[in-house]
Image (cartoon, helix red, strand yellow):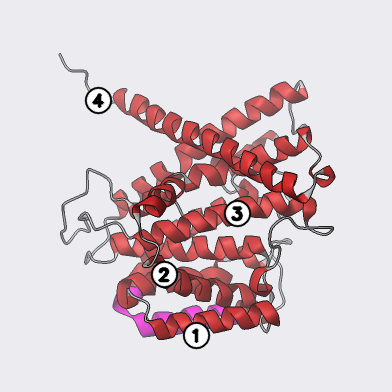
Amino acid sequence: MTALDNMPSASTAGQQSAVGKIKRRPRLFYLDFIRALAAVLIVITHFNNPFMLPRPIFMYEPFGIYVGGLGVSLFLIISGAALMYNHGEAEKLDLKSFYWKRFKTLYPMFWIAFIVANAFLFLRSHGNPYPSVPIRNIVFSILGVDGMVANTSIPTFYTLGEWFLGFIVIFYMVFPLLRWGVRNHPVLSLVVILVLYVATLLINFSLDGLPKAMLLTTRLPELAFGMYFTQYIKKVPWSAALVSLVFLVVQEIHPLLVNDLGTTFVGIAAFILLVYISRFVDYQPIRVPVKSISRYSYPIFLVHHVVIIHVFNLINPTALSTGAAYLLFFADFAVIMVFSVILYRVNRATLAYVRSMFVPAEQ
């Protein structure tokens, strides 16, 4: 999900052993390219909300699926691809190192953003902004799953991070098992994944109202496709790109696949086409902004919804002309980038500060 998934830490770079140490691998432009595009799609999704029915400022249902669904699908495929790219070669995965890095990647930045956002809401509301939520339910926010749990009947302190953050936590937990299956039993693992996927779509059940799109078994094909791609496929031939393009064009003209099934196939087809396209746009003037958005994709993901909501509290978006609405989007995105950079740097400084508490000072 984040740029850190594609960047080995300094402590593990340059090493490769049976216990799963990671050697530094070349940075793949297509991972940054698709991650940056997915981040922009997620911002567009929530900016679009006030305009959805009367006049969406940006595309609302590209290729027959919800624009937010496309952004999430690309993020999931990239998450699987990036993790497998960095951890697919070692014979054994160092679980302690893997989970510790994932913890540092996700939680400190989320906690900082959550605390700052709620401090602001506390001041603006002149008190507790969630008076009806039991204090014990703060555990869902501590674990980063409050956005997902908020889609059930359980009240939470959900402020930012969306349901997707909780889903990524679950994916990180099961990644070692998926990695083992993809590396050692690729065909059998693919069959099991597809059986679970089809069963989830066909069986009528509900987990306290949680949409099927948020279930791991529904998203396994996207996660696994990214993993299989970087482990075995690696490059997209022109024929595969052409098939993907034709499929997307047909979906745009007359959607054949919709809902969760459509999201899976459209996401994979879009990924294939974008990987192919990325080789033709890999130039410095494009690479630099793409790399920047990719690097800050996680803080963008955390802050964008809060920023958009408060901007819309100041400006009535439905009263704007189309041109003014587009200008508002770019202004929104600029503010989101500023807060994302600040959050990114505050997180790094906080981690360094906490680390200094446990490192003996030089005499």
Callout 3: SS: helix
- Quarter of the image where one finds residue 346: top left
Query: Which residue has dot 4 on it?
Result: 359
Mark 3 or mark 2, earlier in chain: 3
For the residues marked 1 and 4, what is the alpha-carbon distance in whole angstroms?
55 Å
199 over 111 or under it: above or below? below
Q: Position of residue 103 (x, y in %)?
A: 41, 45
Mark 3 or mark 4, earlier in chain: 3
For disc 4, the neighbor class at 10 Å (few under 14, some 14 to 19, many from 20) is few
Asked if disc 2 and disc 1 are in contact, CB closer than 8 Å, the reply is no
Callout 2: SS: helix
Query: Which residue has dot 1 on it?
Result: 243
Viewer-nearest residue: 6 or 118? 6
For the residues marked 3 and 4, what is the alpha-carbon distance in whole angstroms?
39 Å
Question: Which span of residues is magenta-colored?
Answer: 182-198
Is residue 132 inside the magenta stretch? no
Q: Label 1 is placed on what type of residue? A: Val
Front: mark 3 or 2: 2
Query: Which residue has dot 2 on it?
Result: 275
Viewer-nearest residue: 207 or 229? 229
Q: Position of residue 49 (x, y in %)?
A: 75, 52
